[in-house]
Amino acid sequence: MITIGMGRVYGAHIIMLTVITMCSPLQSFADDMTNRAVIISSGLPLTRATDEDPLISFHPNAYPSDPSADIPWSCGISGVDSIQCAFNQARSAENAQLGTLLPALTFPPQTTWNSMSDGEKGLWIINRERIDRGITPLEDIETNVTGVAATYAHFLLDNDAWGHYEDGRSPWERLADNQTIGACHDQLSVSENIAVLVSTGGIPIPVERSVYMWMYDDAGSGWGHRHAILWYPYNDNSGAPGMEGLLGIGRASGGPYQGPFSNPWPLAEIVVMNVFDPCVDWEYDSDGDGTPNSADNCPDDANDDQADADQDAIGDACDNCPDDYNPDQNDTNNDGIGDVCDVGPPVSSSSSTSSAAVSSTTTSTGVSSSSSSSTSTIAVSTTTTAGMQPTSTTTVLPGCPVTQLYGENSEEVHLLRKFRDDVASTTPEGKYLVTLYYQWGPMLSAEMEENEAFKAEMKKLIDAFLPVIREGID
């Protein structure tokens, strides 16, 4: 094993890259130490190729070009603003080195980032790095893979050890020894990145800095860590099309720890990244509650107890009317409350118009965890005779363009709802389209209210698809 590279000083912090190879005994060095020094040491990602690997023929052209030189972290370490600054400066430097056009990243707000797990943070960054280089994203984080990574991170810390084989097993063996993973996996020629950060004091944002180092400060390892993050030949045969591979990020904190260094340090953060390619029959558990999606009554919301008070096969954790039977989950006004228990928006008899804010929140496990909101204006027309109470009220509900176009009880609306419930909602792609519809529905409704030509075009577009949908359902 050999250390390659040079210590890097960032203010009061020292960063050192340690590359593990299967060669000579460990050597390490760093520049002058300072108070509260932080040293990062990274293990070479293991790769394995066999003649039996059906995907290995794609390997030579698998990776985007590597930077011509290391791009050190050049921002603070205080939170999301620092993380975004560092990654965007690295992207600008890579663009300058390679003539590429990587776009700037916009990270989620600090409060959102704080609510994310280590795995979710790692997946967010890794998938942005993959997608922006034309590589399909990883599917998700996975509890079994995370467990393997976390167990090994704690083993290294507890045993003051460093390397990929310290527990007597290879990374592939550790993954395969997990019963669920061992029973259903495809051949994959990468498996693990490891990093350690040591300090005399606190160690902020360890996962984010580890991923950064693997991506941008890895010339000493021949960019092997970067290749593991951007690994291309996953066998896309399970889960949603165009996404493959499951990620686990494990982290162990404590000390004292010496590991690959010449002296022990009071505090260490060890980060282990494992990746895994599931087989075609893999049972996904998107919310990590121990119940596979195929049997989970709330596949995107963790609910260990699978409680379903109204017995409509929709778990209470995600039921828009948990106390009222509504298996169709219809929510005409898109307010998050199902029609069967929604009292409806208020209608004013003293005003000809009113406004309502409609919020739509979308979470996509595997690409970001963010939310967006849309506000639309709804028109409420009241017919009134002088000296009398209103005799009729017409309300155009926000957020549902098809209801606005065809009417609540129309054959078209019933057909489209049936397609949503019986066809679209049964696949990840379909669910994503439904989510987009609800996200953009309020804005489309508002535009149709103001623009008759746009409304006519929308109806013409949907009319063209109705025969195809009708044939598919029949």
Image: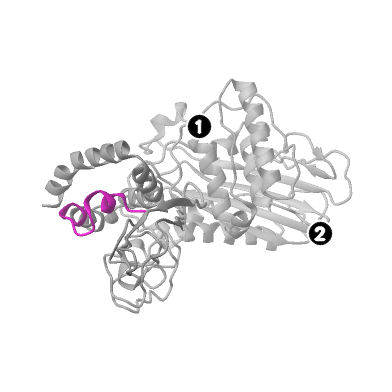
* Residue carrying label 1: 133
In this view, which residue lies farthest toward the front?
387
Q: Which mark is residue 358?
A: none
Q: Nearer the viewer, residue 365 or 65?
A: 365
Q: Identify the residue position indicated by label 2 in the image.
A: 266
Is 178 left, or right, of 194 in this rendering?
left
Name the N-terminal-most of marks 2 and 1: 1
* SS for dot 1: loop
Q: Is residue 64 above or below residue 247?
A: above
The amino acid beneath tag 2 is Pro
- Residue 184 horizontal side relative to residue 11, left or right: left
Residue 212 visible in rendering: yes
Q: Is residue 20 visible?
A: no
Is 404 included in the stretch rendered in magenta? Answer: yes
x 59%, y 27%: residue: 66
Q: Residues within 10 Å of mark 1 (few under 14, many from 20)?
A: some
In this picture, residue 268 sits left or right of residue 91: right
Percent coordinates x, y for residue 226 in the rendering:
58, 36
The magenta-colored residue range is 399-414
How many numbered discs, if any?
2
